[in-house]
Image (cartoon, coloured by chain):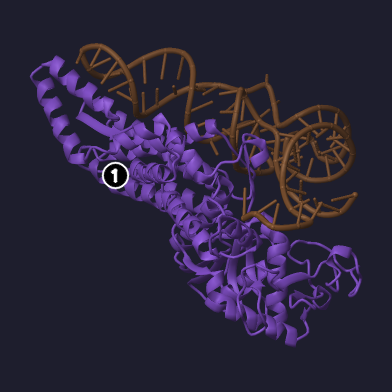
Chain colours: A purple, B brown
Amino acid sequence: MALRLFNTLSGTVEEFRPRVDGEVRMYACGPTVYDYGHIGNFRTFVAIDILRRYLRQSGYRVLHVMNITDVDDKIIRNSAKAGLSVDQYTARYQKAFLEDAAALHIEQPRIVRATENIPSMAEFIRRLAEKEFAYRTEDGSYYFRIARFPSYGKLSKKDFAGMEDGARVDVDEYEKDNARDFALWKAPKPGEAFWESSIGPGRPGWHIECSVMSMQELGDSFDLHAGGEDLIFPHHENEIAQSEALTEKPFVRFWFHARFLLVEGEKMAKSTGNFFTLRDLVLKGNRPSSIRYLLASVPYRHQLNFTFEGLQQATASVERLRNFRLRLSGRFPAGSAPAMQDLARETSGRLRDALDDDLNTAQAQAAMFDMVRAANAAIDSGNLNQEDVPPLLATLTQFDEIFSVLEDDDGARMQQVVGWAREEGKEKDVSAELLRIVGSAALSDGEIERKVAEMTAARNARNFAASDAIRAELNAQGILIEQTKQGIRWRRG
RNA sequence: GGCGCGGUACCCAAGUGGUAAGGGAGAGGUCUGCAAAACCUUUAUACGUGAGUUCGAUUCUCACCCGCGCCUCCA
């Protein structure tokens, strides 16, 4: 079986085939950096990350480009209000976004920025105007003339057939030929930031950057374009119009859109009080790995209800996986058991089948846990042998190449947020839980191993008072001690 | 109003025309100097409501109820 993906353009699940064998060229719409990224943003980016990782696991070389929108109306307004230049204003949010993405183990694509490509955008618009797909208004702005592009609406399945060129629908937009025409270039209003360009002073409209930068990086036609579902219309529809109007070639083959999430059962909104940035969640003591796991656990086309209870559950699930890996590092009798070899192989196949099926992450997780349970039971009954470990571990790794939750770097990532909170004067928002987790990461492995060795020695001497004292000390520092048949096992809690 | 998605156990959540994955929580158990942790077992006469198609529907069709999304800046 091969990867099958839902394509917004066709409205069906299709077998994914890139234009060039073995290579996928994909573009993802990145953030507009006017604020810290929220959990909804990251749902989309985690979904795209899973797509990227699975494409690579499927053997493709992946060229993945993402834009950062570092100029738009909101940025211009907010930066002016803050008395900062556009660059100064966006710098902190860009940095925060990249840190947050890294905390969630979102692999960094090649990044392109709107402000670094303004001459190309102006040139693109000039050529569109030359072909009469764009027109200039009196103030020096440019608009795209959708009446000249008959297939407008093909992505969002909207019918604009009734729209007449020249119909003056909205009095506020009197300069446009048609109310649906969208801005390619905005002439500066007095006091606004602007760029000089071959088509005059101004700033790019929002949609143009993605057409220009994606085609510049990936070619006139490329394989995959991804983003949140809200981008289907108008953003991506407009990208198609601009791009195909200019090149007269199909712009993108597959359109991938992640569904919005709900927070505590409601649409996330500042007014509802259920609006959370990633940093808000970390400040409350939630681990990035739990957040990633929860975001990944509902297939990307389904509405995901993000709740704090769900986050707890995700933490427990991740723990179970990490414990299993820890357990596999133990000693087992020599030899191999056919049942375990089969289990690893079958699970590997199930993982592939699940993800091939439009990235059904929920099923992949189910397959993984089936293996964990069966292997744990085999360990308990002495039916797992040393040679069974590598294939089981390989399957676990196959899973984690996509989900990326096994490595526990939560403490270090969370420490970063504590540092940020201090710099930003948000120290009062740092929760006790956050400090506890960060604290458990403070002791080095070596120090812990040393204490554990002392504890073992005390126990062997049946000096339980001394052993319990060390255990209490470690517990107090956030280190969980597990006493097993094979000796003491520890982990950060 | 137009287009679209969903309603599955206490919670989250897959899925199939032949009677329900997985995780969490709860319960029971194993292990243990004690404790914790870990691990195992277990938990839906039934998939929003009604009708229809069918030998058979949770899965298909229709209606209705409820929730949600896009149509305007929004991941």
Q: Is residue A470 above or below residue A107?
A: above
Mark 1 — residue? A388
The type of residue carrying mark 1 is Asp
Can residue A412 be seen from the camera position used here?
yes
Q: Nearer the viewer, residue A469 or A368?
A: A469
Residue at image point 68% right, 80% down: A125
Q: Where does residue A142 sit, x and y in percent of width and height?
A: 74, 76
Q: Residue furthest left?
A: A461
Image position of A457 with respect to A397: above or below: above
For the point 29% across and 44% down, the residue is A388
Location of residue A45 with respect to B6 vertically, above or below? below
Q: Position of residue A347 (x, y in %)?
A: 43, 46
Q: Is residue A360 visible?
A: no
Q: Residue at x 80, y 76 (%)?
A: A145
Of the pair A341 and A474, the residue shown nearer to us:
A474
- Give whichever of A328, A37 is nearer the camera: A37
Dividing the picture into quarters, in which one does residue A9 lie?
bottom right
Residue positioned 70% across, 75% down in the render = A242
Figure quadrant of residue A120: bottom right
- Pick out the residue farthest to the bottom: A130
- Chain bearing tag 1 is A
Along the horizontal axis of the image, is A120 left or right of A372?
right
